[in-house]
Image: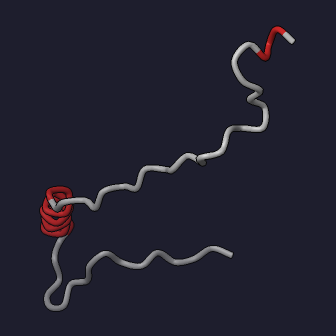
Amino acid sequence: MPTTPTPLFTVERGTPDATELAALTAVLLTRARLLPRPPTPTPSRPTWPHPSYRGPGAWRR
């Protein structure tokens, strides 16, 4: 089922032409790019060893 995309912004008054709308979009995207991003969490590794790990020298057995 296709979904309709939600608009990022709407024009409340007036009818901008394509050039004005493109300029507004460029300004808003540039400003959004300058906003600080929240840090991405680093994935945590489990504290237990992997089941295939048999210890040092296990490949000789």
In the displayed structure, does residue 50 sit left or right of residue 60? Answer: left
Which residue is depicted at the point 17% across and 83% down?
15
Q: Relative to the observer, which residue lies in front, 16 or 23?
A: 23
Residue 22 picture quarter: bottom left
- Residue 5, image x and y in percent? 46, 75
In the displayed structure, does residue 24 sit left or right of residue 51? Answer: left
Residue 39 sits above or below residue 54 on the image: below
- Residue 19, image x and y in percent? 15, 63
Quadrant in the picture for the C terminus? top right
Q: How many marks?
A: 0
Which residue is depicted at the point 25% across and 59% down?
37
Residue extending furthest right?
Answer: 61
Quadrant in the picture for the N terminus? bottom right
Residue 46 sits above or below residue 49 on the image: below
Which residue is depicted at the point 65% across and 45% down?
48
- Residue 31, image x and y in percent? 13, 62
Q: Relative to the observer, which residue lies in front, 46 or 19?
A: 46
Residue 8 picture quarter: bottom left
Residue extending furthest bottom?
Answer: 13
Residue 56 picture quarter: top right
Q: Relative to the observer, which residue lies in front, 3 or 48?
A: 48
